[in-house]
Structures are given as structure tokens and as C-alpha cells.
Image (cartoon, helix red, strand yellow):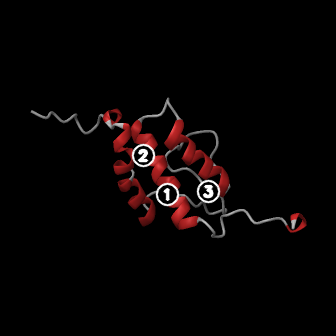
Amino acid sequence: MDVQPPPDEESEISESEIDDYSQKPYLKLQTGHYKVKKVNGTLRCPFCSGKKKQDYKYKELMAHASGVSKGSVSRSAKQKANHLALAKYLETELAGGDHAEPIPPDSQ
């Protein structure tokens, strides 16, 4: 008999299921349910509200999302899945857009 954990026990997601669980937050990012772009042009992590750092450049937010999704031992599987979805969203929806850092003219 297969016993399912209660739906509120997020920590029961296995590492192998993180990819599957990232689909739902990814869709919510695409539909605008989770906001990434701020009015002032900076980006934010919608899954880390209340943290000190709220304003990110594209590369910083991508590094944050990738780091949490792949290597953070202290994060729950649900947080990893959410950040994996954010990294995928940044790559597919915002990469190359006006949020990528421009190359300064003096470095060419």
C-alpha cells in the first residue's frame, strides 16, 4: 500500500522529483502570478521575499536561482524546485532582453 504524505509536507519531495515539481512554479512565472521584474527595472526573487537582498541584476538573479536549485543543502526540495523554475524562466523568457547587462562601450 502506497501512503502519500499530507500535501503541506513540502520537504518530502525527493531530489529526483525536483525537476517535475518545478513545472508548476514555472507556469506561474510565465503567467505573471509570480513577479520577477520590478517597476524600477531591477529584478527580484519571488521566492525569497523578506530577505535583505531584493534588487538583482540579471546575472546576479540567475546565479542566485541556480545556486539555490543545485547546491544549497539547507534549502527544502520545494525551494530548490521553485528556484529551478526561476532559473529556467530567466533563461527562456528574459535572456537577451533588456535585463541582460549591456557591455560597457570602453571594454570593446
C-alpha separation, residue under disc 1 versus residue under disc 2: 11 Å
Q: Is residue 58 left or right of residue 5?
A: right
Kind of residue indicated by mark 1: Lys
Crowd around label 1: few <14 · some 14–19 · many ≥20 (10 Å): many
Disc 2 element: helix
Kind of residue indicated by mark 2: Ala
* Rendered image: mark on residue 43: 3
N-term-proximal mark, 2 vs 3: 3
Residue depicted at 22% across the width and 34% down the height: 5
**Along the line of sight, which residue is nearer the eye, 42 or 5?**
5
The quadrant in which residue 96 appears is: bottom right
Q: Residue furthest right?
A: 106
N-term-proximal mark, 1 vs 3: 3
Residue depicted at 34% across the width and 50% down the height: 20
The x, y position of residue 28, in whole percent, is 40, 59
Seen in the picture, residue 69 relative to 86 is either above or below; the reply is above
The x, y position of residue 1, in whole percent, is 9, 33
Residue to which mark 2 is pinned = 81
Residue to which mark 1 is pinned = 88
Q: Quadrant of the C terminus?
A: bottom right
N-term-proximal mark, 1 vs 2: 2
Q: Is residue 50 left or right of residue 11?
A: right
Residue depicted at 30% across the width and 34% down the height: 9
Between circles 1 and 3, the one closer to the viewer is 1
Disc 3 element: loop
Crowd around label 2: few <14 · some 14–19 · many ≥20 (10 Å): many
The quadrant in which residue 91 appears is: bottom right
Residue depicted at 13% across the width and 35% down the height: 2
Q: Is residue 31 left or right of residue 52?
A: left
